[in-house]
Image (cartoon, grey):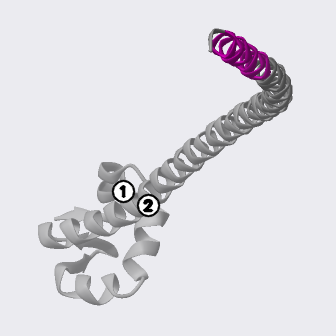
Amino acid sequence: MKTIKQIADEIGVSRQAVHKKIKQEPLSTSLQEFMSTKNNVVYISVDGINLVKTAFLKDSLTTNSVNQLSTMTTQYMTSLQNQIDFLAEQNQDLREQLNKERDHSREQTDKLSNLAAQLAELTRNNQILLGAEQSRTNSALLNDNLTSEQSEKNSHKKRWQFWKRNS
């Protein structure tokens, strides 16, 4: 059996803290059977000492747990904020890259449109030149045909006349 002062020294708290804890419910009811008084000094048995130590340990754990939880929450929030900042920066980089790609695509489309217009112009010019060449070729063929027909007529005449003279 130990006194409240001895228990306080073991736990590392003041005698008043132990006395206050012992008077709080539900510990006060649980300790009644483990406490005795001799010469106005309160003694607590080994089982009662364990109950008091457990009560202080729970408070200590709760305080430590709250502090640890607070620290972990702060660290977690900092980590999340860092991730948000990283993702925002990455998002900005991707937007800039997308804008560059769009600009490049527009330039390529413009170049392609210009090339298509040039090709269409060249095709028209080629068709005009081809038509003119065909016209000249047709004229030349027509002239050749006419000349050849005239030549045949002339040769026919000469033959006819040749035969005519011999008869």
Q: Residue at x 41, y 63 (%)?
A: 62
Q: Residue 25: give its label.
A: none
Q: Is 54 above or below relative to 86? A: below
Q: Which residue is mark 2?
A: 15
What's under tag 1, amino acid-wise?
Ala
Can residue 165 be seen in this snapshot? yes
Q: Is residue 153 magenta?
A: yes
Q: Nearer the viewer, residue 50 or 41?
A: 50
Crowd tier of the residue under label 1, counting other residues whose Cα lies within 10 Å: few below 14, some 14–19, many 20 or above: some
Where in the figure is residue 81, as x and y percent of width and height?
A: 64, 45
Q: Is residue 25 magenta?
A: no
Secondary structure category for the residue under label 1: helix
Q: Nearer the viewer, residue 83 or 20?
A: 83
Q: Mark 2 near mark 1, Cβ–Cβ under 8 Å?
A: yes
Q: Please state the extent of the stretch shown in magenta in the rendering.
A: 144-165
Q: Which residue is mark 1?
A: 8
Where in the figure is residue 12, as x and y percent of width and height?
A: 38, 49
Image side of residue 31 versus residue 90, left or right: left
What's under tag 2, amino acid-wise?
Arg
